[in-house]
Amino acid sequence: MIRESTKVVDIGGVKIGGAYPVAIQSMTNTKTEQVDATVNQINALEMAGCEIIRCTVPTMEAAEALKEIKKKIHIPLVADIHFDYRLAIAAIENGADKIRINPGNIGGEENVKAVVQKAKERHIPIRVGVNSGSLEKEILEKYGHVTAEGIVESALNKVKQLENYDFDDIVISIKSSDVLMSIKAHELIAKKTEYPLHVGITESGSAATGGIKSAVGIGNILYQGIGNTLRVSLTADPIEEIYAAKTILKSLGLKKGGINVVSCPTCGRTEINLIKLATDVEALVKDYDHLDLTIAVMGCVVNGPGEAKEADFGIAGGKGCGVLIRKGEVIKTVDEDKLLTVLKEELDSYDKK
């Protein structure tokens, strides 16, 4: 499902492209200048499964803070630059593993050349980022409005700017908040370039609506073998972006391992608060994602064990009671309010083996 012809790019030791797996990214929402807060958030994101992190660099103080941040984290750091080419150069000098720029908004060809030369000197990749909301006036006039074709043309024009300086350590990002436009743009650009692509639906919304739009858009793109890194951009705690990204990759068979929670829909036979129980189980198993297990949450003690037989462990509840299930067999009967507790005990026991 992965386009193995894609160029391989090394981002601080994490390789993307070729046959390498799709890497999960997120972005900090702390002030980058606040080193401790930024480091704490990055380390929490890494624990959740983030593999590459991006920090905004709007000031020289933020660029200089990257040096201290790098000393205290374990995953590659990408510096996000807008408008000031000097910040891109400073970010590279202070240890950024990759920079994200729009060559069209950093102030002229000499500035682009200066950034490229510094990136070549330090062997740092450049991610060319183009969003549907940042298209040049000429592109908009050519196509009449924002289109997938225009997004692709804009991105490839900017790639050409970098190639003019004999630079090809490039990652491309083309994003739109329009799901169908994003899908079409990625289909078009995949036919025109072998550079690795960072995929996502920009400004997708909250964890609920944004997660759905991202799953549809990113899932469709990845299913076609397009894409080498992804970010699920949510108006939410960045940790939620990681959980959503992992779920998308697992659903497509692009990520193995981790806890997979399955739960039945509610119906008239349900006599417990199944919605809360399923939500509580999903929160619980985040601490066990290093295990390769399927957990079932069922709302009926009669049919639950049979329906959960494909799961490694499961819980099912009835009126005031519940059962713990292992491979479809009931191994313990408990009070309804003890279901989460016995599941945790079972996971702890399994984890110690």
Image (cartoon, grey):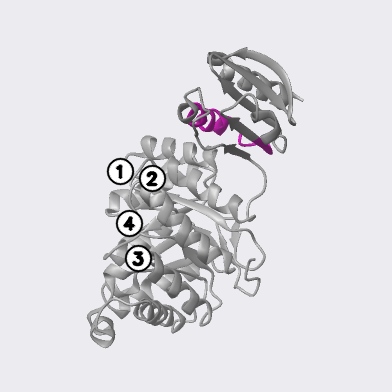
Residue at 25% in and 81% down:
140
Give coordinates of residue 52: x percent, y percent: 50, 52
- Badge 1 local density, few (<14 within 10 Å), some, or many (20+)? some
Question: Which residue was labeled with disc 3?
Answer: 178
In the picture provided, is 64 more to the left or to the right than 22? left
Residue at 49% in and 75% down:
187
> Which numbered disc flags the more N-terminal residue, 3 or 1?
1
- Badge 3 local density, few (<14 within 10 Å), some, or many (20+)? some
Q: CA distance from mark 4 to mark 2?
A: 13 Å
The front one of 286 and 318 is 318
> Which numbered disc flags the more N-terminal residue, 2 or 1?
1
Give coordinates of residue 209: x percent, y percent: 36, 49
Magenta span = 277-294
In the picture provided, is 46 more to the left or to the right than 21? left
- Badge 4 local density, few (<14 within 10 Å), some, or many (20+)? some
Q: CA distance from mark 4 to mark 3?
A: 9 Å
Name the disc covering residue 31, or none: 1
Question: Which residue was labeled with disc 4?
Answer: 203
> Which numbered disc flags the more N-terminal residue, 4 or 2?
4
Give coordinates of residue 304: x percent, y percent: 64, 30
